[in-house]
Image (cartoon, helix red, strand yellow):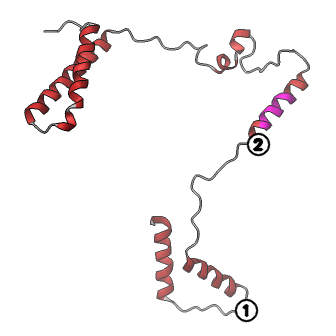
Amino acid sequence: MEEAPPSVSELILSLQQATFMAKQLSTTSNPTHLHQIHSSLHHAHRHLSTFLSILPSPPPPTAAENSLSSANGAALDAGEPMQVEDGGGGDEETTSKCTIDKVEEKMRDCFIKNKRPKRPLSPSAAAFAEEKRFSDDGFGGRVKDYDPHAMRLRALDLVYQFHG
């Protein structure tokens, strides 16, 4: 049993009713009223889906509409698609220099930025780096003993650096 496609006026009435019912959604807690709101919204959804299903789908864009040549107007000139014309048809060297100048001008404002800036070193890591630099100078003797406190601080610094 397939129902007839709704007319535009039926669709409008259904959507208006659903809008009216949806506005009452936040003010009611009665289960019967909530069921009425739900059925009204479901009915409007079904009408809208049916209406949209009978509409013809738009044709896909043609190749000329979806290409770079249409964006710069070269398709209309029937020339090379990647050519930028100054309108004068002058010397090729002048045209290429002009194009290069335009690109360089636009690139001055463009710069590459790191996606994630580096986090600053924690105080204990900075102190460790300073101590290591001092011991690598040859003036201080490197301690070959195991220091559990320093190892714990380095481990915590790594945890905070990557999970903090």
x%, y% of residue 116?
Answer: 57, 56
Category of crowding for the residue at label 2, using alpha-carbon neighbours closer than 10 angstroms: few (below 14), some (14–19), many (at least 20): few
The residue located at (76%, 42%) in the rendering is: 108
The residue located at (15%, 37%) in the rendering is: 28
x%, y% of residue 3?
Answer: 17, 9
- Secondary structure under tag 1 reads loop
The residue located at (58%, 14%) in the rendering is: 63
| Range of residues picked out in magenta | 97-105
Q: Which amino acid does label 2 sit on?
A: Arg
The tag on residue 99 is none
Residue corresponding to mark 2: 108
Count of numbered marks = 2
**Is 108 situated left or right of 68 in this image?**
right
| Residue 99 colored in magenta in the image | yes
**Is 30 situated left or right of 113 in this image?**
left
Upstream in sequence: badge 1 or badge 2: 2
**Up-down: is 32 above or below 148?**
above
**Up-down: is 5 above or below 27?**
above
Residue corresponding to mark 1: 139
**Disc 1 and disc 2: Cα gap in Å?**
48 Å
